[in-house]
């Protein structure tokens, strides 16, 4: 039964469906659940720092339920997305209802879409990577696959990484710099891959062009089927989805910097270069994303077997709570700045 604890990750789309179906003030159930109820639960439930035994690891790697719990997000995300767009475009909604529905679906796109896409994007099989890219499509963030896998994991915790927040940088500034720098970085990575294979930018192997085509076609289809309201809904929900991702990026490496060795190169990525959280609710709902230190230490490890490292910097709260705190920069700086190692601040 313990293996089924990750079913709790589906609680967010279920609550979102309730809001979309019944409407009224219930459209705000999802943000209330995600950013008020879950943070409160994280304060109540104890930390869980236990790591699996080698026998448990082998058992969990053989159990396909963990993979299917990820795959199920594909029909859930798209089903909820199109249900929301349909409801918004065929009903005479109050403005607050439309806003609440968009925010709710946007949260699902971020949590059950991009977050799951991140996990599947590190898998070795083509089918799993395809599902991951499909989950990035509604958030208009397919380039994340390239930049994250070939950029972020190479440059994390360095000034060269767009997804690493600088010490004393607020989350709103980070949204702007990270969104645009990551897109440009993805293009730079793609161009290098094309040049290495003697191909030009219009090559059929240019994934960045394909991503642009797929996302444009997605929006055109939405517009022709559901009209302006449908297009507004799709674009707005997508923006909320990728801003949630960028907020997670912000808290994952805030202020942490890899030091340079005598040769002038950065030290290798270690467990100390990502913020870790063992708050059980956030761990389950986010498919262990909060054990981010181990993910960067060995990105090929599946979510169900990620470890906690004693040397990793620990967040005082879970990821959902920390995302809320990041929205209030003075409070965030007050809590987190004193936790950043002094040698990293002066680096």
Image (cartoon, rainbow, N blue to C red):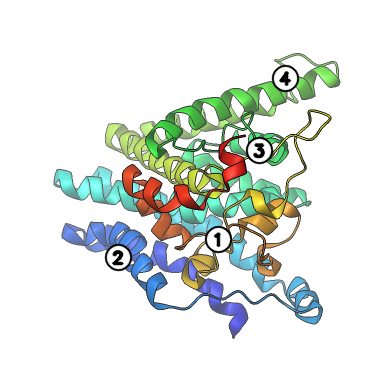
- Can residue 149 be seen in this snapshot? yes
Q: Nearer the viewer, mark 3 or mark 1?
A: 1
- Horizontal and vertical percent position of residue 7: 52, 73
State how far apart marks 3 and 1 are (Cα).
Answer: 21 Å
Crowding near the residue tagged with mark 4, few <14, some 14–19, many ≥20 C-alpha atoms within 10 Å:
some
Q: Which is nearer the N-term, disc 3 or disc 1?
A: 3
Residue 152 badge? 3
72 sits to left or right of 224:
right
In the foreground, 224 or 259? 259
Determine the image quadrant of residue 72.
bottom right
Q: Nearer the viewer, mark 1 or mark 2?
A: 1
- Horizontal and vertical percent position of residue 87: 28, 50
Element carrying mark 2: helix
Above or below residue 19? Residue 343 is above
- Can residue 328 be seen in this snapshot? no
State how far apart marks 4 and 2 are (Cα).
Answer: 44 Å
Residue 191 badge? 4
Determine the image quadrant of residue 29.
bottom left
Q: Which residue is mark 1?
A: 314
Crowding near the residue tagged with mark 3, few <14, some 14–19, many ≥20 C-alpha atoms within 10 Å:
many
Q: Which residue is mark 2?
A: 18
Q: Are marks 1 and 2 in contact (CB under 8 Å)?
A: no
State how far apart marks 2 and 3 are (Cα).
Answer: 36 Å
State how far apart marks 1 and 2 are (Cα).
Answer: 35 Å
Element carrying mark 1: loop
Please name the residue shown 50% across and 69% down the image.
279
Q: Which is nearer the N-term, disc 2 or disc 3?
A: 2
Element carrying mark 4: helix
Above or below residue 269? Residue 261 is above
In the foreground, 120 or 93? 120
């Amino acid at each position: 039964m313990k293996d089924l604890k990750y079913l709790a990750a589906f609680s967010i789309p279920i609550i979102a469906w309730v809001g979309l179906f019944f409407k009224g003030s219930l459209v705000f159930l999802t943000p209330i659940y995600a950013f008020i109820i879950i943070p409160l639960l994280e304060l109540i439930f104890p930390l869980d720092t236990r790591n699996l035994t080698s026998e448990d690891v082998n058992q969990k790697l053989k159990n396909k339920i963990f993979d299917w719990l990820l795959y199920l997000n594909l029909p859930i995300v798209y089903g909820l997305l199109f249900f929301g767009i349909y409801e918004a475009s065929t009903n005479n909604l109050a403005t607050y209802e439309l806003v609440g529905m968009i925010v709710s679906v946007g949260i699902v796109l971020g949590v059950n879409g991009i977050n799951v896409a991140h996990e599947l994007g590190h898998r070795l099989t083509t089918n799993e990577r395809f599902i991951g890219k499909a989950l990035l499509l509604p958030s208009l963030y397919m380039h994340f696959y390239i930049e994250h896998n070939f950029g972020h994991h190479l440059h994390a915790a360095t000034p060269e990484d767009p997804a690493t927040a600088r010490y004393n940088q607020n989350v709103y500034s980070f949204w702007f710099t990270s969104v645009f720098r990551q897109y440009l970085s993805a293009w730079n990575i793609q161009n290098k891959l094309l040049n290495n294979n003697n191909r030009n930018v219009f090559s059929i192997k240019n994934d960045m062009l394909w991503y642009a085509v797929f996302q444009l076609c997605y929006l055109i289809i939405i517009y022709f089927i559901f009209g302006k309201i449908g297009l507004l809904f799709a674009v707005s929900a997508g923006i909320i989805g990728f801003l949630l991702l960028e907020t997670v990026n912000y808290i994952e490496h805030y202020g942490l910097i890899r030091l340079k060795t005598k040769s002038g190169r950065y030290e290798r990525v270690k467990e100390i270069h990502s913020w870790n959280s063992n708050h059980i609710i956030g761990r389950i709902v986010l498919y262990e994303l909060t054990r981010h230190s181990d993910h960067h230490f060995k990105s090929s490890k599946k979510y169900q077997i990620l470890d906690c490292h004693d040397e990793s910097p620990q967040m005082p709260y879970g990821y959902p709570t920390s995302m809320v705190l990041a929205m209030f920069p003075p409070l965030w700086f007050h809590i987190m700045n004193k936790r950043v190692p002094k040698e990293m601040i002066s680096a």
